[in-house]
Image: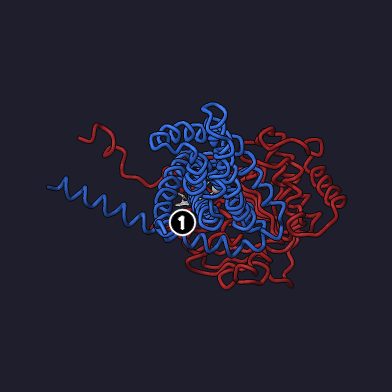
Chain colours: A blue, B red
């Protein structure tokens, strides 16, 4: 009986803790936005972070995009040819990538490649008192360290998702047209006819923007909030990857249910 | 050496300052003042709250009682912008250096200059090299912090702390982990920088002999209170048991070596 009570108590404590952290993160987002003006005026800081988060994630994004595209080409052809509509392969590959796989998979990869790195970097700066030293030098660490990394992530994310989708479409084309022999003209013309810029492309971009905000916020928050010890930093990195993945998938469901209802 | 200037109010003055981390009260009423031009040492056993005291003077912690005044401003009533304005005229040497690990030695020292001034790059370069020269590390300008020894890192941090020619310099354990030669050099450096800049310094340290040689005034802290104070000569001549224990490094005396704990017999012996 006391085991059950303890169990329930633990769940309750976890829930309360979760709500607290969500509140702190929201307040932290407010602070980051408040000090963003200062840091965006010094563009080189943000550009440097776009390089570290975005440009250095490019390789893994492109390679993964290619593989996802190749798989989509194989699976899509296998399914579509049962209905005698393998010409629609281009449409299927493009829509799955632009609407779902591009934003979601790119964000998942981004969280584990760049988000974890940002958490580790900020966490270590906190552990070694670099943030306190900066604060003592009258330089606000949120403006100087956190905001550029946040915006670097937010700006990189949609661009990376676009790269991922482009690479995926290329992969689908490679399998479908070059190896299997789907008609090249049909592949592209069906795709062009079926993909709507506002409905499909814009919604995909909105998704990846939202994921970019979520992942970047989680990454900078976990780093800034970590317990300043080696163990604390390692736990913060784990939390960044896990919470980002959950946030991406949950937000994807919410956004999809608003965006795509089969009009 | 002591430049007492009674006509001017002290640069730093603490009166009745109290501070607690949660339930644990660390400071229980500290009165202390630092006059302009002085180097003041704060000594006390490990964990007695010296770093905390320095953080209070730097405005990183807020006292739960009493007042902390720096350059005539009561820190409790200061907004963020005013506090930052005040900190631009302070330098702090952290206990472990706290150099920015993603920047070279040069960029570390240039950091405050680049953040707070619009000086042209050539001028920043000259200033940085001069500060590095003062700590004897001009030749290490291109190294990264990971390539420095502990003592070198401390000296770079010192150069960075004085980059903006502060009026008040706070040192947290500047001597910890240094060999006797570097120790003497850093000690002299602290004195020389203080006098050359016309600044005032507060130094937290365990090192009695080194610091008695360079400071103007000493405060001893124990159990959250100032238990003794005086000029180095007064301290050397003091009959106070606390000072005596500290200066002569005796294990027995009023300074407790142990963190508060239940009697050891209760904790050992398998909990029987
Ligand atoms: N962030 C904190 N949270 C809770 N307690 C703390 C914190 N920082 C310090 N303390 C406690 O406050 C006391 C004073 O700490 P402080 O760091 O000021 O000591 P110190 O005099 O600088 O010691 P040392 O000479 O070893 O550096 C210690 O007993 C420590 O346990
Ligand atoms: Mg300390």
Residue located at (57% from left, 73% from top) = B77
Outermost top residue? A179
Is A138 drawn above or below residue B188 in the view shown?
below
Locate residue B14, reporting x and y percent. Answer: 58, 66
Is A62 drawn above or below residue B228 in the view shown?
above
Residue located at (55% from left, 68% from top) = B15
Under tag 1, what secondary structure? strand
Residue located at (70% from left, 60% from top) = A41
Q: Identify the subunit bearing mark 1.
A: B
User: From the viewer's perspective, is A201 left or right of A37?
Assistant: left
Q: Which residue is mark 1?
A: B26
Locate residue B140, reporting x and y percent. Answer: 77, 36
Q: Does any atom of ligand 1 lie closer than 8 Å to the CB of label 1?
A: yes
* Residue B241 seen in render: no
| B107 or B26: nearer the viewer | B107
Is B269 drawn above or below residue B229 in the view shown?
above
| B44 or B139: nearer the viewer | B139
């Amino acid at each position: 009986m006391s085991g059950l009570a303890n169990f329930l108590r633990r769940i309750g404590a976890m829930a309360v803790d979760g709500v607290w952290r969500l509140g702190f993160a929201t307040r932290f987002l407010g602070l980051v936005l408040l000090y963003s003006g200062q840091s965006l005026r010094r563009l080189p800081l943000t550009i440097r972070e776009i390089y570290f988060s975005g440009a250095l994630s490019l390789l893994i994004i492109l390679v993964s995009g290619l593989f996802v595209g190749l798989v989509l080409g194989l699976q899509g052809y296998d399914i579509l040819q049962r209905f005698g509509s393998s010409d629609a392969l281009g449409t299927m590959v493009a829509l799955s990538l632009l609407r779902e796989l591009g934003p979601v998979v790119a964000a998942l990869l981004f969280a584990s490649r760049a988000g974890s790195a940002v958490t580790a970097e900020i966490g270590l700066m906190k552990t070694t008192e670099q943030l306190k030293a900066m604060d003592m030098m009258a330089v606000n660490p949120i403006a100087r360290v956190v905001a550029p990394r946040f915006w670097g992530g937010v700006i990189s994310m949609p661009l990376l998702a676009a790269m991922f989708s482009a690479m995926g479409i290329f992969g689908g084309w490679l399998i479908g047209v070059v190896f299997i022999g789907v008609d090249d003209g049909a592949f592209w013309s069906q795709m062009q006819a079926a993909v709507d810029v506002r409905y499909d492309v814009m919604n995909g971009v909105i998704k990846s923007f939202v994921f970019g905000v979520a992942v970047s916020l989680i990454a900078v928050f976990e780093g800034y909030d970590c317990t300043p010890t080696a163990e604390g930093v390692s736990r913060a990195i784990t939390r960044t990857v896990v919470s980002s993945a959950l946030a991406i998938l949950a937000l994807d469901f919410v956004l999809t249910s608003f965006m795509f209802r089969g009009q | 050496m002591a430049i007492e200037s009674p006509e001017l109010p002290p640069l730093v003055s603490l009166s009745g300052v109290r501070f607690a981390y949660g339930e644990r009260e660390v400071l229980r009423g500290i009165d202390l003042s630092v006059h302009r031009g002085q180097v003041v040492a704060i000594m006390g056993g490990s964990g007695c709250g010296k770093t905390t005291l320095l953080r209070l003077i730097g405005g990183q912690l807020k006292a739960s009682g009493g007042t902390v005044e720096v350059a005539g401003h009561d820190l409790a009533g200061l907004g963020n912008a005013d506090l930052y304005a005040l900190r631009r005229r302070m330098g702090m040497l952290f206990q472990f250096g706290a150099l920015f690990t993603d920047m070279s030695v040069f960029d570390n020292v240039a950091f405050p200059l680049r953040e707070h001034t619009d000086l042209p790059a050539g001028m920043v370069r000259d200033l940085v090299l001069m500060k590095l020269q003062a700590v004897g590390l001009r030749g290490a300008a291109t190294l990264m912090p990971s390539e420095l020894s502990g003592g070198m890192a401390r000296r770079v941090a010192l150069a960075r702390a004085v980059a903006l020619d502060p009026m008040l310099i706070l040192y947290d354990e500047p001597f910890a982990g240094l060999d006797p030669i570097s120790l003497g050099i850093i000690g002299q450096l602290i004195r020389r920088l203080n006098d050359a800049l016309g600044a005032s310094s507060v130094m937290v340290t365990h090192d009695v002999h080194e610091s008695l040689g360079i400071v103007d005034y000493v405060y001893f802290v124990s159990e959250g209170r100032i238990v003794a104070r005086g000029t180095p000569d007064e301290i050397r001549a003091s009959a106070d048991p606390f000072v005596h224990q500290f200066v002569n490094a005796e294990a027995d005396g009023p300074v407790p070596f142990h963190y508060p704990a239940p009697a050891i017999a209760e904790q050992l012996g398998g909990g029987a």
